[in-house]
Image: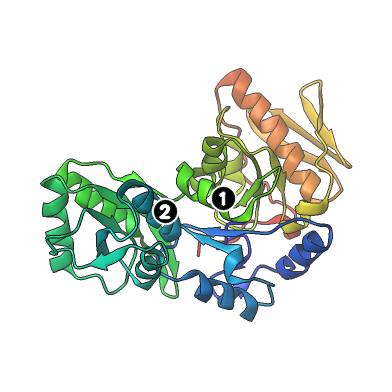
Amino acid sequence: MLDLDGVVYIGGEAVPGAAEHLERARKAGVRIAFITNNASRPADDVAAHLRELGVEARTEDVVTSAQAAARLLRDRFGEGAAVALLGGPGLDEALRDEGLEPVAVSASEAVAVVSGYGPKVLWRDIMRAAVRVRDGLPWVASNTDLTIPTQFGTAPGHGVLVGVLREFSGVDPVVAGKPERPLFDETFRRVGGEHPLMVGDRLDTDIDGALNAGCDSLLVMTGVTGLAELVAVPSGRRPTYVAADLAGLLEAQPTPGLSDGAAELGGWRVRVESGSLGVEGNGSADDWWRAVAAIAWAHLDSSGEVVDTGGLEPPGAGSAQPDG
């Protein structure tokens, strides 16, 4: 289960090597699913975008938070139910695919409100939806992402709108997207598989979501999580595996050896001295990240303090990219 932005692509460009790594995984018998909190685009549009970037993808390989939200609503209210839509085309299509009827937020026949990111959502509809939620109409939100990447930089995401509606109404929505379970459950239902693995670049959605869903996770260092964030992850919220990029899908994930206050792996030796992280040696970018994470987390668990990474530069192949 692959997150998209920061894992498969960054903005409008594919992450270097992503298409080749995924093709190798497919040939090895791995079933690939692309899962996204973005509810604005239909799955067919997402798949087409991936193919434009050289990544093999069918519509049925894509699972969106809009689809997960629609499934929640159909399971609760049944086929044919009218749902007040506050969102974009992806959410509209997902509702229709589940046999639900999208209606205006003012429609009296609506049995629930569903919200998702949509660049053309009008303030008058936000106001009407907020009042209806306050007055008791059930509310499902596609996701609570506070930011989204855009061509003009990182911008407010649907989570900002959720915050506005929540503060006004005093109501918490049922959330379909990561890190909550519905998107994972929808993916399991659609794709199947015996040993699901969540692959992502975000700790708060991808890795926390995998933990909530009870599945393993692989954190790749090509997106928003950088060195400072990695070494500060507390116990109970850490990824199962760490790799520089998607090449880690088909590589062994060795555990660094810990002794005498140091972690050693693949030619790297990492120590914490006077609260600062130091690295010696040479080896692969994957092993660098794993060794650094192992000793930093051991230090955090024993001392309660996050190591200082000032001046430490990751290997070029595993350097984190800027958000968006």
Task: Label 2, secondary structure: give it.
Answer: helix
- Considering depth in this image, is 311 or 155 the residue closer to the camera? 155
- Considering depth in this image, is 94 or 202 the residue closer to the camera? 94
x then y, percent, for residue 149: 45, 66
Seen at 81% across and 57% down, the residue is 29
Mark 2 neighbour density, 10 Å: few (under 14) some (14–19) many (20 or more):
many
- Considering depth in this image, is 114 or 73 the residue closer to the camera? 73
Left or right relative to 95: residue 265: right
Q: Amino acid at mark 2?
A: Arg
Mark 1 neighbour density, 10 Å: few (under 14) some (14–19) many (20 or more):
few
Going from the N terminus, do you reach mark 2 or mark 1 first?
2
x then y, percent, for residue 77: 30, 50
Seen at 26% across and 64% down, the residue is 85
* Res. 178 mark: none
Task: Label 1, secondary structure: give it.
Answer: helix
**CB atoms of marks 2 and 1 within 8 Å:** yes
Can residue 144 be seen at all in this image of the molecule?
Answer: no
Left or right relative to 284: residue 277: left
- Quadrant of res 35: bottom right
| Distance (Cα) linking label 2 and label 1 | 11 Å
- Quadrant of res 128: bottom left
Vertical relation: 76 (above or below) 305: below
Seen at 78% across and 27% down, the residue is 262
Q: Amino acid at mark 1?
A: Arg
Colour scheme of the picture: rainbow
x then y, percent, for residue 221: 65, 53
Write down the residue under mark 2. Answer: 71
Write down the residue under mark 1. Answer: 189
Can residue 6 be seen at all in this image of the molecule?
Answer: yes
Left or right relative to 163: residue 10: right
- Quadrant of res 277: top right
x then y, percent, for residue 17: 75, 68
